[in-house]
Amino acid sequence: MLSLTLVTLVALAAGFAVWAADRHRDRYGALLLPGISVVASLLTWLGLQAAGAASFEADWLGWAVPAAVAVLAPMVAAVPIGRSRGAADASETERILRL
């Protein structure tokens, strides 16, 4: 249970770090990227536990792989989300200004 708690806290911190480093963070909420990070790392942790890959011999897999996923998932998700939100905001602004 300790590994699950630590994986969750590391994922949350990594998600906030990616959100803080993103140039386009004003286009979406502050909890979107940390949420993506936590969900991705917990699904990875659950998959590793179910597969038995995080057994006693390879205990580091249960910590290292979800931590890597916790950093990569919000970085990958931030690009299309920022683009689509930017385009949606621009079109909505144009629609409002035409009224």
Image (spheres, helix red, strand yellow):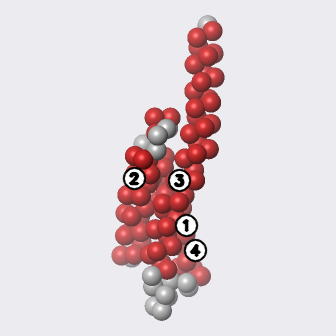
Mark 3 surroundings: few (<14), some (14-19) or many (≥20) residues within 10 A: many
Residue assigned mark 3:
75
Say which label, 3 or 1, has the lower sequence index: 1
Does the image show residue 94? yes
Mark 1 surroundings: few (<14), some (14-19) or many (≥20) residues within 10 A: few
Say which label, 4 or 3, has the lower sequence index: 4
Residue 18, horizontal then vertical, whole percent: 44, 51
Say which label, 2 or 3, has the lower sequence index: 2
Q: CA distance from mark 4 to mark 1?
A: 6 Å
- Mark drawn on residue 26: none
Mark 2 surroundings: few (<14), some (14-19) or many (≥20) residues within 10 A: some
Closest to the observer, 80 or 59: 80
Residue contact between numbered discs 2 and 4, judged by CB atoms under 8 Å: no
Residue at (63, 15) in percent of width and height: 95
Hey, which quadrant is residue 73 in on the image? bottom right
Residue contact between numbered discs 4 and 1, judged by CB atoms under 8 Å: yes
Q: Amino acid at mark 3?
A: Met
> In which quadrant is the N terminus drawn?
bottom left
Apparent side of residue 52 relative to residue 38 in the rendered image (left or right): right
Say which label, 2 or 4, has the lower sequence index: 2
Q: Amino acid at mark 2?
A: Ala
Residue 85, horizontal then vertical, whole percent: 58, 34
Disc 2 is placed on an element classified as helix
- Mark drawn on residue 47: 4
Which residue is at the far top? 99
Say which label, 2 or 1, has the lower sequence index: 2
Disc 3 is placed on an element classified as helix
- Mark drawn on residue 43: 1
In this rendering, the answer to whether 59 lies above or below 3 is: below
